[in-house]
Amino acid sequence: MTTAVHDEQSDMNQGVFDPMPEAPALTPRQYYRLPWSLTDNGISWLEVTDACNLACEGCYRPHHDNHKSLEEIAGELEVFKRSRKSDCMSLAGGDPLVHPQIVEIVRMVREGGWKPIINTNGLALGHKLLARLKEAGASGFTFHIDTTQTRKDSAAETEADHNALRTRFAKMVAAAGGMSCSFNQTVSVNTLDQVKDTMAWALQYPDIVHTVVFILYRSPSLTGDFDFYANGQQITEHEHYDDSAWGGDSLVQARHVVAKLREVDPDFEPSAYLGGTVDPEATKWLIAARMASKDKGFGYVSPRYMEYLQIGHHLFKGTWLSYSTPKLLQRGRSTTAIFSLLDKGMRKIGKRYLGAMGNHELSIKDKMHMQTFTIIQPVDLLPDGRANMCDGCPDMTVHDGKLYWSCRLEEIKSYGCFMHAVPKGCKQPAKPALSD
Ligand code: SF4
């Protein structure tokens, strides 16, 4: 994942160029605010190694080939257990598949009561390893594939060129059975238009591509005019967040991606979000869920449906739902039928489905799948220097026995504290801003 620094929808006052001024602003209050929090969340984030077999542009974690021992990992799981409930445990790195004991780690996570989701570039994944990971309890994979990478398994100039590789992984996971399959793609201003190609590709595979996540690129050169401080000393932010030509010269925001996705599917409509810690207009995680058979889409679920889903899961399983299993995702017909009784938005989907049946566009054997699209807008800096983080951060990780935002862990490792931004021309405050 790439990281952070700049502000949100109100940010164009610092001379930062808006690549798509016509993209309408989003109104988070019309969506369901996911009830995820520091102590009770859909996801937690376990980094098992900092080693990686790729070098993605904008990666925020330096690679030193340090694999954590099983004892260290058991200790971190203990911290999660003590301080935070979560449905899924994202195994991350580095690339977790280069850890020689990844199968044992997956087993430990599953035995600890979490659904293990493996975040990987997929380079080290073969059929044998896939089978062993499944047997150990892997619940799903999130493949990071995009043009920030120079891959030996996909010579791609554009995001569309990677679609054959994405299809290969989706089919591989589907053939193994029972595990979810998601794809992450970093988006910069240079690749913004290409989200349409990834979306058009994903729409063809609602049965095996369960989630697509667009992560918006952040880099220091796009931050606006700030000086950065840690421990009372001025620092160069570039020490930790490498700038990249790939990232272009302006910030992409969630509303830009929504506008592009609507060019492919005019029905595209988010239903849930995570806000910002300091900006009420922010949609740091924005989630849309589509109901579709293999050949036809019926629309996007309503905010009310998302609310029922989260609350139902919490009532019956004790955690907020994240990364549903394929078994649940393919029950779109029954969930739409039930929720049509309660909600207008879901009735619309039900009517479209029945209409398609009536027109013989579908057979009774065709399943209805739920497919999710998520847009993540990492750390932004407000013009006054406050860092707008994801409120209810799902990617909290453990370091030295404490929970930290994984996207800013390098600051803690280097300074023992978070750096804070001061608009140029302002005096450095005596103490760090509250948000830091
Ligand atoms: S605040 Fe959390 S969820 Fe948001 S980008 Fe950082 S680590 Fe990821």
Image (tube, grey):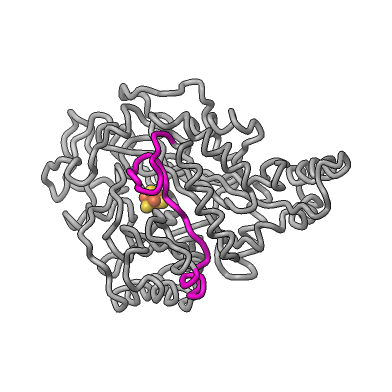
Q: What's the magenta region?
A: 131-158
Residue 223 placement, left or right of 191: left
Residue 265 is situated, as x and y percent measured from the top left of the image, at 63, 33
Residue 435 inside the magenta-drawn segment: no
Q: Residue at image x 39%, y 30%? A: 189
Residue 250 is situated, as x and y percent measured from the top left of the image, at 34, 28
- Residue 11 appears in which quarter of the rendering? top left
Residue 196 is situated, as x and y percent measured from the top left of the image, at 53, 33
Q: Is residue 5 above or below residue 19?
A: below
Q: Residue at image x 52%, y 47%? A: 212
Residue 152 inside the magenta-drawn segment: yes
Can residue 322 be seen here? no
Asked whether 337 or 192 is in front, the reply is: 192
Asked whether 108 or 294 is in front, the reply is: 294
- Residue 323 appears in which quarter of the rendering? bottom right
Residue 178 is situated, as x and y percent measured from the top left of the image, at 60, 66
* Residue, far right: 358
- Residue 156 appears in which quarter of the rendering? top left
